[in-house]
Image (tube, rainbow, N blue to C red):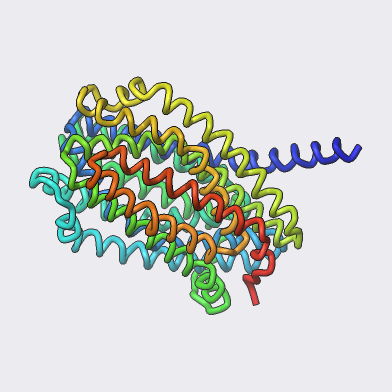
Amino acid sequence: MLLINEINRRKEMIKNILVLAFPAVMEMSLNTMLGFADTLMISRIIGKEGLAAVGFANQIIFTLIFIFSSFNAGATAMVARSYGEKNYKRLNKIVGENLTLNLFIGIIIFMASYFYGDQILKVFDISKNVYQMGLSYLKVVSFSQLFMFISFAAAASLRGAGDTKTPMYITGMANILNIFGNYALMTGFYVFPELGIAGAALSTTISRAIAAFLYLYILISGERKIKLHFHSLRISTYIIKPLWKLSYAAALEQFFMQLAFFTNGIIISKLDTTSEAAFRILINIESTSFMPAIGIAIATTTLVGKHLGEKNPEKSLDTGYTAALLGIVWGIFMGTIFFLLPVPILSIFTSESPLISRAINSLKIAGFNQPLLAFMIIMAGALRGAGDTRGAMILTSLRLWTIFIPLSYVFAIILQYGVAGVWIAEISSFIIFSILINRRFKSMKWAKIKIFD
């Protein structure tokens, strides 16, 4: 009887995770498909130099975005905790103030990427043509940052309240517009001007603007679980203080993470253009594995925070491990595909034999990393949902800077393994730190963390 009850309890937990995770996974998959479509069109229409240029330009944009969007991790945890406590007045206040904060950050990121992007691009050891293409793309796409941050804030709030469907629908619509816009503006289809790589940037900006306005409409109309009031937009210490308490560690984590990726980009730029393009293709392919894991992590963050709001830390612990198991299963599935079918997968993105040859071994190596990658992503999401953003920050930063970056340089440059060296370094870092993050979550020290005074 006890065994039957345990099986039923576990099945209910998996169901709750999947109900929230499925729309989030679909949203992440749609984002991955957009990355695929962008990579495919730029590779086919403009060539490998255009592909490398967009990769380096986006590295600047996303370095800034991920660092400063970290406040949304704290907002999601606060909304989830308030939702679990049924404190809807505080919930809506969190939504409003986080939106205001993101609006200011979006303006700052736009100004930084537009006015100083040319100087940042010079950090990379790239050809003059790749630099000019990257700058052309960066100048246009920088305008989209304001809209992106509005969407980030709204989506984080909706997910915290358990609504993962709305972000999925809006993301899907925006991505479809982006794909059609890319083709039309890059090639000059029908009445549209032929703008080349700048057309891809313009299409991205337009689709992000439409998504932001849809999010605002939904929040203001109150058609979902959240109702945005204009008086809630005013900043107060009651909300900002705990938001900062939760988010500063997430911001530091993203700072160290994006700085590591940026440094890794510099390492990759020391290789030839074929290796640079191969690296960008591999990153897009690997997104098929970790995007669904991020979707499960989003659900885990919400449920762990909600159960803590309900004063049930044991259920939070069980939810975290159940979600991690789902992620490992997914990682094994994707890793098997990467290992067995590298050539057919790579052939989707390019017909150039040198590019495919350069990437085959790296994709096979990446296959072994997928279960560990999924486990780390979901465990970090569980810690953030519990309010332990500091623990997630320390473990992630140490993994990147004590193992991943040093070994990337050693394997890729010194030992001349090229792009494959990056994935060897990544596997090495995940093996060690998956053990450490498991120990942190299992300790349940996060159950004692207080978000609100």
Asked if residue 295 shows in the view, the reply is yes
Image quarter in which the N terminus is found: top right
User: Which residue of the protein is positioned furthest toward the left in this rendering?
Assistant: 128
In the rendered image, the residue lying farthest to the front is: 415
Q: Looking at the image, which residue is at 49% across and 65% down?
A: 98
Left or right: where 2 falls relative to 41: right
Q: Is residue 9 above or below residue 446?
A: above
Quadrant hosting residue 328: top right
Q: Is residue 397 above or below residue 191?
A: below
Q: From where the camera sits, is residue 181 visible?
A: no
> At which x and y percent is residue 386?
62, 60
Q: Residue at x 45, y 61 (%)?
A: 70
Q: Is 435 placed left or right of 396 in the picture?
A: right
Quadrant (top left/top right/bottom left/bottom right) for the C terminus: bottom right
Taking the spot 82% from the left edge, 40% from the top edge, the residue there is 6
Tell me residue 161's x, y (percent).
62, 54
**Residue sitting at 55 percent across and 57 percent down?**
157
- Front position in the image: 37 or 301: 301
Tell whether 230 sits left or right of 121: right
Q: Quadrant of residue 46?
A: top left
In the rendered image, residue 365, in percent from the top left (x then y), is placed at 39, 34
Coordinates of residue 238 in the picture (x, y in percent): 58, 77
Front residue of 259/413: it is: 413
Query: How many marks do you count on the picture?
Result: 0
